[in-house]
Image (tube, rainbow, N blue to C red):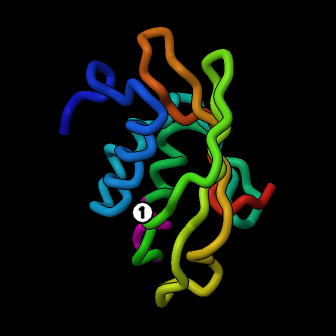
Amino acid sequence: MPDNALTGPRSLAQLIALWCSACLRADVTELVSLYEDGALMVTSAGEVLEGRDRLGEALRDALACLPCAGRRETRRCLEGNGIALLINAWLGEEEQRAPDISTGGLGLMIARRQPDGRWLIAMDVPQGTV
């Protein structure tokens, strides 16, 4: 895996492509590298997780439950002043391994351009619940 600190996503399209690719490969290490150190994630239960370690645990659990974790499309991307809001649609209603996790619906991400030019995820609300 390339060191994302040196070669990370330089555009929002690249960030989205890397995120989806890492999901499809269930590569939690690469996924976590696409988030800021102090990134926040809101779980489907409404719990707010902070930091790469906590996000890594949640992502690992989600990837174990969702056979289509990487199947999503970005419906809308609003960018300005180095901040972007990504509105993502989760695709499909494949068989789930965990009944409390939906494989369809909307998710939200806020990404921020870093001083070195990379785009990283600052906040993630995968199932659109706050």
View extreme (top): residue: 115
Which stretch appears magenta?
60-65
Which secondary structure class fits the magenta region best?
helix
Q: Position of residue 85 (x, y in %)?
A: 67, 38
- Whether residue 109 is visible: no
Determine whether 124 is above or below 129 in the image: above
Q: Quadrant of residue 6?
A: top left
Q: Position of residue 17 (x, y in %)?
A: 38, 46
Residue topped by disc 1:
70
Q: Position of residue 76 (x, y in %)?
A: 64, 47
The residue located at (37%, 30%) in the rendering is 9
- Front in this rendered view, residue 3 or 10: 10
The kind of residue on which mark 1 rests is Gly
Determine whether 79 is above or below 116 in the image: below
Q: Quadrant of residue 4?
A: top left
Query: Tag 1's secondary structure?
Result: loop
- Whether residue 90 is visible: yes
| Residue 97 is one of the magenta-drawn residues | no
The residue located at (48%, 55%) in the rendering is 57
The residue located at (32%, 46%) in the rendering is 29
| Residue 64 is one of the magenta-drawn residues | yes
- Front in this rendered view, residue 101 or 73: 73
Q: Position of residue 82 (x, y in %)?
A: 61, 18
